[in-house]
Image: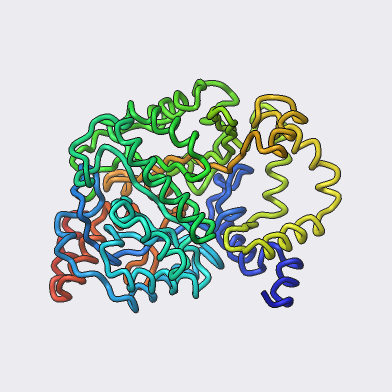
Amino acid sequence: MPSQTLWNTFRHPVPTENRSNLSRHWDGLAPELKEPRQMFGRQWEGCAATVGAMPKCDFSCTACYLGSEANKVPALSVAEIRAQLKLIRGWVGRWGNVQLTDGELTLRDESEVIEIMRAARELELIPMLMTHGDSFRKDPELLGRLAVQGGLEEVSLHVDTTQRGRTGYGVETDEAALHPIREELAEIVRSTRRATGRPIRAAATITVTRSNLSGVEAIVRWMTANSDVFRIISFQPVASVGRTRDDAAVTRRELWEEISKGLGESIDDSESTFNSSLLFGHSACSHVVMGAAWSGKNGSAHFTPLRSPADDAYERGVYEFFERFGGLSFRSDRPLQGFVRMAGVLASAPWFFLSKGPAWFTKWLRRSSRGSGLGAFAKLVTRRAQVHGVTIASHHFMDLATLESDEGKEREAACVFRVPHKGELVSMCRMNAAGLREEQYAAQRDPQVASKARAALTTRL
């Protein structure tokens, strides 16, 4: 890596472009959302996703945002997807998050999937492939090829009982019965890391309906025990969009009661995971808890949130760090650059780390290990225990009625998850609930019918 690049990393551990982009997002937030817990515009620049990249899927799930016409729609060209990525780059910033999705992208020609991933990396975006994972089960070396040839480092694996079409499985009603699939996919990630030397990070995406709500507890326990692979656990209660057949609403509290059971705690505890969330945009849209999973040699594992609401001094340390180093990320770094970036962080505020770091770190060790700070540190050094950063989140999408309500308009104004549509970025909720996806697909299938889709949308609204 050129010495000039390393010097710039040391001098600006949070790139100037990212700081500017964060400020722009922060300025666009409503005043009531600008509180210490707010990460949008302070630490995070939002997320975006492609649309039309592969509007086909070999599954037929009971909860899906794709419409019935999806499998009849041709995919956009790589050049058109590249144009979407350029638009996304202007919003999420340098090394921002982009989800490669819209149906099952791995059904597209492998060379084109690799080309799309390369395009994202060339634009300094971090692509995450959203997939049901069956393509990796059929060809376990596929993930390695995408990593080596396409630069893929992040993948989201969607496994739950709402899915239909999984190889070797029929209709399952018990989430625990799908643990063998989760284990199979986890082993593919682990083996690919070993074979390629690439730091592949995985997320788990789970659709939640009334029918599988009781299975959330088992999912959380399994995911916590496998935090070496799954660093993000994302639950998405179903919304009445697309071809969803099971649209009975699941409230946030009902969902997090089950998550809390899986973590072995009470949702009403002041220090519970549920009460330790951070804000990412509007509070009604996402419930996000950053933390760590501590696992021991005996297979035991538990999750501890980053925040500690009952400890004011500890809480202030968390918020002050984000205030000083908002936007800091090591996800795109190779080891040397990551080391230099950390050195730059330490050099930029030595008194902050010397005066507050040891006490904060000791408290964090005690909380995360549920033991003494010194004993926890000894376990880490001797590798008798491991700690992995984990984020547990629920994302609550809107149906059309909610979207058009006063609250829905407030939520959409603070949207952190957007997709390209006609040269601009719109909220994912508007894309799915207000008919824009149908309009997009109509144009892809036959440009002449796009006007009919727009007329239908006007009537619907």
Give the residue drawn at x 67%, y 68%. Answer: 16
The reply, left or right, for residue 456 in relation to residue 202 is left
The reply, left or right, for residue 187 in relation to residue 28 is left
The reply, left or right, for residue 3 in relation to residue 279 is right
The picture places residue 167, in percent across and down from the top left corner, at 22, 47
Residue 234 in sight here: yes
Q: Which of 162 and 183 is in front in this view?
A: 183
Q: Nearer the viewer, residue 62 or 45?
A: 62
Residue 426 in sight here: no
Q: Is residue 197 above or below residue 450?
A: above
In this figure, what is the number of numbered marks? 0
The picture places residue 361, in percent across and down from the top left corner, at 75, 38
The reply, left or right, for residue 261 in relation to residue 379 is left
Q: How is the image coloured?
A: rainbow
Q: Quadrant of residue 394?
A: top left
**Quadrant (top left/top right/bottom left/bottom right) for the C terminus:** bottom left
Q: Quadrant of residue 68?
A: bottom left
The picture places residue 391, in percent across and down from the top left corner, at 52, 42
Give the residue drawn at x 39%, y 28%. Answer: 218
**Quadrant (top left/top right/bottom left/bottom right) for the N terminus:** bottom right
Q: Which of 399 and 78 is in front in this view?
A: 78
Instruction: Tell which residue pokes out farthest to the front in this image.
Output: 195
Q: In this view, does 163 lie above or below 145?
A: above
Give the residue drawn at x 27%, y 29%. Answer: 174
The picture places residue 346, in percent across and down from the top left corner, at 79, 55
Give the residue drawn at x 59%, y 38%. Answer: 292
